């Protein structure tokens, strides 16, 4: 005799009720988006219409995704999630008109060069220090008769929503309740360094962070091939994935991955590079691009990043300090991995979050020539960590404040792509943000020690 389906819990919304609320939120969004678009005058008049269409489509996609979730939900959390998504999109649309040196000097000219030279056909000769996956997106933009700035920002804004949804999905694996998942959704979407990065700065740090979180998600779901593929895509988008890279070793040590699964990393990396080879790129360029990036920005110990070098009196390149930073980052990673090898104990899913936060704060803090944006993944992980451990709620404000202050210095004060940190209400240097990042790293490392002991006791108790 078949088991009857379980009745939804008392107070849960029916699908019809959720659909009505979804339609209502979608219908309320055009006035909000229209209000935000009054600030947008970068492109032609038709671009405002295109922006309205694109962001209404994004609202509809977000609301429908919320509608189709398969778990029962009460009306208040459902309505609040919808409001958070709509307001997050509204906030980003209000930033569309903002220009920064990165767009004016790099992204905009790259798209224009592709447009003038056949789109994808121009990839073979394009002089860019970005890797191919993101250039593919710019090549697609070059075929579309809509404002480049709008489309570049739209890609990153859509990435923000996917990142937030991935974080919430991870929260289910971590056992977060409904209220914690709602706080996490708002925390990721309204973190200043998240929406400033995409909607104001037109940067794409959200994309490599998204795939890094997807790697963690698929590891927890027991899909190792997909997890390593996601890691490879993250690395193919940005070199900054190396801050998360030691987590692959952690997954190996905890038997969540096997050595054979690592074959997916080079396979996916080469696969995404194939279209570039067909356009005339050399095979060697697939591997030399990150070396070029490193050498291009090696003339300063810190490029406005809240790293260890902010505590030094000068910022000129210095051989001993530069080398010491590289050695320190490598030694820390090796020491932590050696510690885990010696333990030979399973690690709980939430402890993996702590481990990732440790790596993504300590490694960029030690490395020289870091930009202000390179703590982006640490910002997102800090929000997740604060929600997971309410007693450590201050970890997220510490990390976000450290990153935001250096964002503020570049976005609102620097000119001609300069790296000058201004006086921000008495904060006359990078030393305070650098100490805050060190504080977050220290707290996470201390908690990791405690959590690993708890994990071991739990497994022994079984």
Image (cartoon, rainbow, N blue to C red):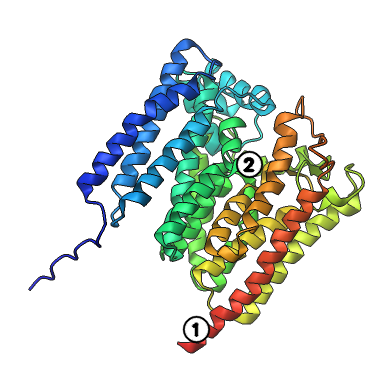
How many badges with numbers are in the image? Answer: 2
Res. 241 in view: no
Label 2, secondary structure: give it: loop
User: Which numbered disc, 2 or 1, marks the residue that appears first in the sequence?
Assistant: 2
The Cα–Cα distance between marks 2 and 1, rounded to whole angstroms, is 47 Å
Q: Which of 224/403 is in front? A: 403
Residue farthest bottom in this picture: 461
Name the secondary structure under disc 1. Answer: helix
Question: Does residue 420 sit above or below 326 in this rendering?
Answer: above
Residue 152 numbered mark, or none: none
From the viewer's perspective, is 87 left or right of 252?
left
Quadrant location, the N terminus = bottom left
Can you say which quadrant of the picture contains the C terminus?
A: bottom left
Tell me, yes or no, if residue 396 can be seen here.
yes
Q: Residues within 10 Å of mark 1 (few under 14, many from 20)?
A: few
Q: Which x, y percent locates residue 340? A: 63, 75
Point 82% across, 34% down: residue:
420
Return the residue found at the far top. 45
Q: Residues within 10 Å of mark 2 (few under 14, many from 20)?
A: few
Name the residue: 59% across, 74% down.
451
Q: x, y percentage for residue 377?
A: 61, 50
Residue 251 in the image: x percent, y percent? 54, 67
Residue 27's image quarter? top left
Q: Position of residue 264 (x, y in %)?
A: 48, 56
Q: Where is residue 419, by image quadrant?
A: top right
Q: Which residue is mark 2?
A: 284
Q: Residue at x 72, y 30 (%)?
A: 412
- Compared across the picture, whether 102 is left or right of 296 comes to left
Residue topped by disc 1: 459
User: Is 67 situated left or right of 93 in this image?
Assistant: left
């Amino acid at each position: 005799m078949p088991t009857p389906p379980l009745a939804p819990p008392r107070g849960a919304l029916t699908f019809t009720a959720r659909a009505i609320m979804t339609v209502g939120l979608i219908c309320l969004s055009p006035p909000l988006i229209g209000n935000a678009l009054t600030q947008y005058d970068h492109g032609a008049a038709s671009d405002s219409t295109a922006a309205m269409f694109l962001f209404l489509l994004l609202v509809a996609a977000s609301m429908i995704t919320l509608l189709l979730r398969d778990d029962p939900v009460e009306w208040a959390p459902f309505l609040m999630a919808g409001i958070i998504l709509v307001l997050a999109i509204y906030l980003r649309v209000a930033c569309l008109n903002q220009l920064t040196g990165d767009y004016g000097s790099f992204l905009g000219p790259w798209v224009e060069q592709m447009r003038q030279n056949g789109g994808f056909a121009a990839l073979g000769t394009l002089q860019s220090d970005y890797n191919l996956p993101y250039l593919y997106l710019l090549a697609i933009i070059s075929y579309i008769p809509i404002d480049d700035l709008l489309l570049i920002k739209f890609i990153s804004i859509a990435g923000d929503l996917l990142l937030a949804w991935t974080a919430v999905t991870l929260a289910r694996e971590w056992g977060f309740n409904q209220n914690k998942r709602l706080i996490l959704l708002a925390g990721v979407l309204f973190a200043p360094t998240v929406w400033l990065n995409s909607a104001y700065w037109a940067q794409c740090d959200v994309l490599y962070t998204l795939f890094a979180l997807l790697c963690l998600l698929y590891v927890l779901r027991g899909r190792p091939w997909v997890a390593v593929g996601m890691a490879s895509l993250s690395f193919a988008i940005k070199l900054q994935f190396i801050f998360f890279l030691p987590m692959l070793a952690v997954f190996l040590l905890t038997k969540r991955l096997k050595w054979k699964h690592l074959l997916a990393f080079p396979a996916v990396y080469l696969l995404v590079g194939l279209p570039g080879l067909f356009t005339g790129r050399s095979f060697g360029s697939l591997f030399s691009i990150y070396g070029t990036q490193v050498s291009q920005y090696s003339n300063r110990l810190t490029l406005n990043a809240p790293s260890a070098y902010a505590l030094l009196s000068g910022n000129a390149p210095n051989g001993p300090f530069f080398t010491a930073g590289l050695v320190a980052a490598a030694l820390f990673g090796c020491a932590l991995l050696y510690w885990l090898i010696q333990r030979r104990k399973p690690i709980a899913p939430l402890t993996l979050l702590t481990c990732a936060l440790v790596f993504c704060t300590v490694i960029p803090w030690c490395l020289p020539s870091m930009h202000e944006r390179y703590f982006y993944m640490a910002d997102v992980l800090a929000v997740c960590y604060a929600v997971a451990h309410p007693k450590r709620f201050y970890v997220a404000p510490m990390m976000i404040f450290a990153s935001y202050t250096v964002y503020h210095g570049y976005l609102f004060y620097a000119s001609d792509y300069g790296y000058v940190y201004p006086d921000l209400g008495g904060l006359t240097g990078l030393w305070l943000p650098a100490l805050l990042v060190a504080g977050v790293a220290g707290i996470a490392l201390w908690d990791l020690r405690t959590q690993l002991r708890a994990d071991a006791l739990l497994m022994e108790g079984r």
